[in-house]
Amino acid sequence: MFHWLEKRPFFFSVVLFLVIAFAGLIEIVPDFAQASRPVAGKQPYTLLQLAGRHVYIKDSCNACHSQLIRPFKSETDRYGPYSLSGEYAYDRPFLWGSKRTGPDLHRVGEYRTTDWHENHMWEPTSVVPGSIMPAYKHMFHQNVDLETAYAEALTVKKVFNVPYDKPGHTKLGTWEEAKKEALEEAKKVADDMKNQDVKDAVARGEIPEIVALIAYLNSLH
């Protein structure tokens, strides 16, 4: 057979390509599958964080901020360790981004505080002189849509087998349980904020968008 192939360059090339392609798949696919699994300690978003992610997308934060740190020294020096595929296991959709009008936010939870985000979203230039980012004061008065976030969490739990309620993972529970957990988390965020209107709203059992957004940003590590 090999003698026959040696006399037919076209077929020899085809067989060689198939052998290399098959060997490549055997080598690459297992590593790719392993890399795409959640990194150790990765948790699904809480209901409040997921609602904040919806605010992030709704107000087009992802249009100016990426969430993907590339494996280059210039990136890691500024933003921290480069991103791993397993860190996005529970992200739907991915928010990698293709433009950076503002900095990358993949690890913003490691170096920004609730207080900083509050001031930044209310008046960006108060913490970043010369910033061209607009103010998002409406977030301080508009309540977040928890019901849609809960519906998404239930969907990804059932369809994509996101491990909500499994031992060692984020709990979701019933709608009433999830809403109570979200309000408790919101109170912790609001406690670190200065805006009295926000504090009063949370005390009444309401959750302004800014609280959910900050909870989401604080979860990015």
Image (cartoon, rainbow, N blue to C red):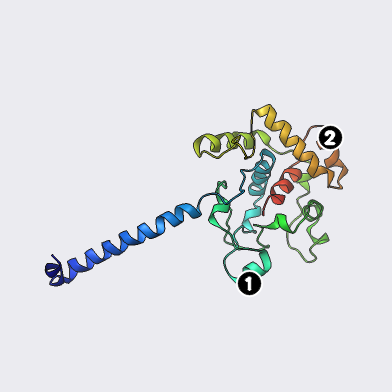
Q: State the image coordinates of residue 219 (x, y, percent, origin top left).
A: 69, 49
- Badge 1 is on which residue? 74
- Badge 2 is on which residue? 203
The residue under the point 67% across, 64% down is 79
The residue under the point 75% across, 35% down is 183
The secondary structure type at the circle numbered 1 is helix
Please, what is the three-letter code of the amino acid marked with disc 1? Ser
Callout 1–callout 2 Cβ contact below 8 Å = no
Q: Nearer the viewer, residue 103 or 19?
A: 19
Q: Is residue 106 above or below residue 214?
A: below
Q: Nearer the viewer, residue 156 or 213?
A: 156
**Could you classify mark 2 by the number of other residues whose Cα lies within 10 Å: few (under 14), some (14-19), or many (20 or more)?**
some
Q: Is residue 24 left or right of residue 91?
A: left
Q: Is residue 198 left or right of residue 167?
A: right
Quarter containing the N terminus? bottom left
**Count of residue discs:** 2
Residue 107 position by quadrant: bottom right
Residue 45 position by quadrant: top right
Q: Is residue 58 above or below residue 130?
A: above
Q: Is residue 207 visible?
A: no
Please, what is the three-letter code of the amino acid marked with disc 2? Ala
The secondary structure type at the circle numbered 2 is helix
**Could you classify mark 1 by the number of other residues whose Cα lies within 10 Å: few (under 14), some (14-19), or many (20 or more)?**
few
Q: Nearer the viewer, residue 57 or 8?
A: 8
Q: State the image coordinates of residue 214 (x, y, percent, origin top left).
A: 74, 48
Q: Is residue 127 above or below residue 88?
A: below
Q: State the image coordinates of residue 90 (x, y, percent, origin top left).
A: 57, 46
Residue 134 position by quadrant: bottom right
Q: Nearer the viewer, residue 218 or 131?
A: 218
Q: State the image coordinates of residue 118 (x, y, percent, origin top left).
A: 80, 51
Q: Which is more N-terminal, label 2 or label 1?
A: 1
Distance from Cα at disc 1 to Cα at disc 2 = 44 Å
